[in-house]
Image (cartoon, coloured by chain):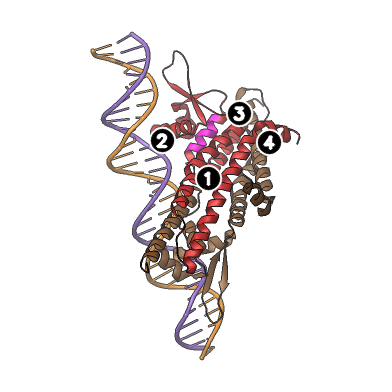
Chain colours: A red, B brown, C orange, D purple
Amino acid sequence: MYYFYPVKLEEAQQKFIQGWGQLGASWGINRTMAQIQAVLLLSPKPLCTDEIMEKLQISRGNANMNIRELVAWGVAYKSFIKGDRKEYYYSEKDMWELAKKVSRERKKRELEPLVKILGELQTIEGNNKEVKEMNKVVKSAGLMAKRAESILDLVMKLEEKVFFKWFRRK
Amino acid sequence: MYYFYPVKLEEAQQKFIQGWGQLGASWGINRTMAQIQAVLLLSPKPLCTDEIMEKLQISRGNANMNIRELVAWGVAYKSFIKGDRKEYYYSEKDMWELAKKVSRERKKRELEPLVKILGELQTIEGNNKEVKEMNKVVKSAGLMAKRAESILDLVMKLEEKVFFKWFRRK
DNA sequence: TTATATTTTCAGAAATAATTGAAAGTTTAA
DNA sequence: TTAAACTTTCAATTATTTCTGAAAATATAA
């Protein structure tokens, strides 16, 4: 029994890290970045760069860049231990907060550029089918994008207040 | 004036195609696949492979693979013209329907694998911090995933009619 | 100061993903 | 049948992204 837990834990952690990385990758987020997030999520205490490098077997440069990116997204934080010069990092652990921050970042990076482009494509004049189709598509895509933004805003505003209560009941 | 519209249209189309491709790319969807979708969206009539190859300057193999992928996702359809042996393709033009189909596909490809993995990581026994953190994370990630699925389902069930009315009020 | 610890950068290497194009496969018309 | 029209496949190539590791920059302690 003494021997059993640690092995099982390692295995489970590895599985979680892989799955989380895969999820990130299919969302257009660097796989390593997502894996680092997973490692931080699983750690009960802040970790330094070397510990992360060790855990994921990656280089210092890679670790550094991706950690910084996580901090820039607001899903990981720096932490200092007095008497120690190293920087330590820990993850946002509230999944709802995490989801909100990722949504916000993606909205900024993806939806907004499209909305900008659509705005630049003001109605074109003309009577042929192609022009009409163009105007129709630009208009409906713009509506859709706004709609998506509204839904996101709405969902994010609902906040724990509603969702927590709702989901705790299940 | 005769000369003016076509140039402007071409430009606008190109801009839209690029923007749409970019959106797709940042969503982990092949850029060319998204661009083909954009071309079909802009076209008032179904297009054959050669027309798409011509418009995007891509090879037959590339065009074929990505068109098929679009059809597999359910966001483009085949169409036949009698007396013509070629297959023609047209896009789903209802943006709301399009969004629903993409969501459905992504949910299947991304959320579900994570939920499966989390399910396999049943509670591990043990009293140390790492084990406790592991169990906590697995549980909250599972809850979050279910929550995301619920929100998606809910949003997708609300018909266009409801949203239209609702958003027009704002 | 100077030395040491730590973080950051970035050119080149490695890994991954997308694309081509020609050959093989399929369908249809005659 | 056979031939022509068209679609699909896939090995090889090309493009893109990610990663490494060592050097440069920065920060802290002595």
Q: Is residue A111 above or below residue A48?
A: below
Disc 3: host chain: A
Residue A35 vs C4, above or below: the answer is below
Residue C9's quadrant in the figure?
top left
Q: x, y (%) of residue A90?
A: 52, 26
Q: Residues within 10 Å of mark 3 (few under 14, many from 20)?
A: some
Question: Which quarter of the rendering shows the C terminus of chain B?
Answer: top right
Q: CA distance from mark 3 to mark 2?
A: 28 Å
Ranked by sequence position, the earlier of labels 1 and 3 is 3
Given residues A154 and D2, the one toward you in this image is A154
Report, in whole angstroms, how far the alpha carbon at label 1 lies from the one at label 3. Answer: 32 Å
Residue that mark 3 sits on:
A6
Q: Are marks 2 and 1 in contact (CB under 8 Å)?
A: no
Q: Tell which tag, 4 or 3, sits nearer the viewer.
A: 4
**First of labels 2, 1 by sequence position:** 1
Q: Which residue is mark 1?
A: A27
Q: Are marks 3 and 2 on the same chain?
A: yes
Pointer 2 and pointer 1 on the same chain: yes
Find numbered disc 4 in the image and state the secondary structure of the residue it sits on: loop
Q: Which residue is mark 2?
A: A62
Pick the front one: B111 or B82? B82
Q: Quadrant of the N terminus of chain B?
A: bottom left
The magenta-colored residue range is A33-40
Q: Nearer the viewer, mark 3 or mark 2?
A: 2
Name the residue type under label 2.
Answer: Asn
Q: Can residue A39 be found in the magenta stretch? A: yes
From the image, state whether disc 2 or disc 4 is nearer to you: 2
User: Hey, which residue is sitting farthest right in the picture?
Assistant: A169
| Left-right relation of B93 to A109 | right
Q: Chain of mark 4?
A: B
Q: Cβ–Cβ below 8 Å for labels 2 and 4?
A: no
Label of residue A128 in the image:
none
